[in-house]
Image (cartoon, grey):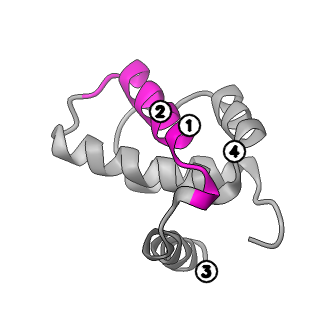
Amino acid sequence: MSERKSLQEFINHWVALINGPVPSREQFSLWLALHSDETVFYGITATAKKFLQERGNMSLTYLTKYASKVMSNRTPATIPDREKQYVTHLRKTLYR
């Protein structure tokens, strides 16, 4: 991604994909301080998949820890191209 996205865009991405509790702005700020935009978008998307698998039975603490774990384990170099393309597609679809 050529320019850094706003904090609100990441929060909007979370809300669009996860119909559940939303982490604090400080948590999003921490993720963005530690990870690239792609990694944060990927982590949110992976968390949304897990949330659906669990049928929404995830607390805010569980959601936050899961997202953090995914982001920590996925650096831009380890994200396969197909996942990068999926994240790019999601961003274009959700944020026209």
**Total numbered labels:** 4
Please state the extent of the stretch shown in magenta in the rendering. 58-77
Of badges 4 and 3, the one in the foreground is: 4
* Label 1 environment density (alpha carbons within 10 Å; few <14, some 14–19, many ≥20): some
**Residue corresponding to mark 1:** 72
Which circle's residue, 4 or 3, is located before the other in the chain? 4
Name the quarter where the N terminus is drawn. bottom right
Label 1: element kind: helix
Callout 3, which amino acid?
A: Arg
Question: Marks 2 and 4, Cα distance to the nearest angstrom?
Answer: 12 Å
Residue 22 visible in the shown view: no
Amino acid type at image mark 1: Ser
Q: Tags 2 and 1 in contact by the CB under 8 Å rule?
A: yes
Residue 66: say if magenta: yes
Amino acid type at circle 4 is His
Q: Which mark is residue 35?
A: 4
Q: Assess disc 4: are there few (<14), some (14-19) or many (≥20) residues with their C-alpha within 10 Å of its C-alpha.
A: some
Secondary structure category for the residue under label 3: loop
Check disc 2 and report its element: helix, strand or loop. Answer: helix
Q: Give the crowd class for mark 2: few <14, some 14-19, many >=20 residues within 10 Å.
A: few
Q: Answer with left or right where residue 8 lies relative to residue 55.
A: right
- The residue to which callout 3 is attached is 96
Q: Amino acid at mark 2?
A: Lys
Per the model, the C-alpha gap separating discs 4 and 3 is 24 Å
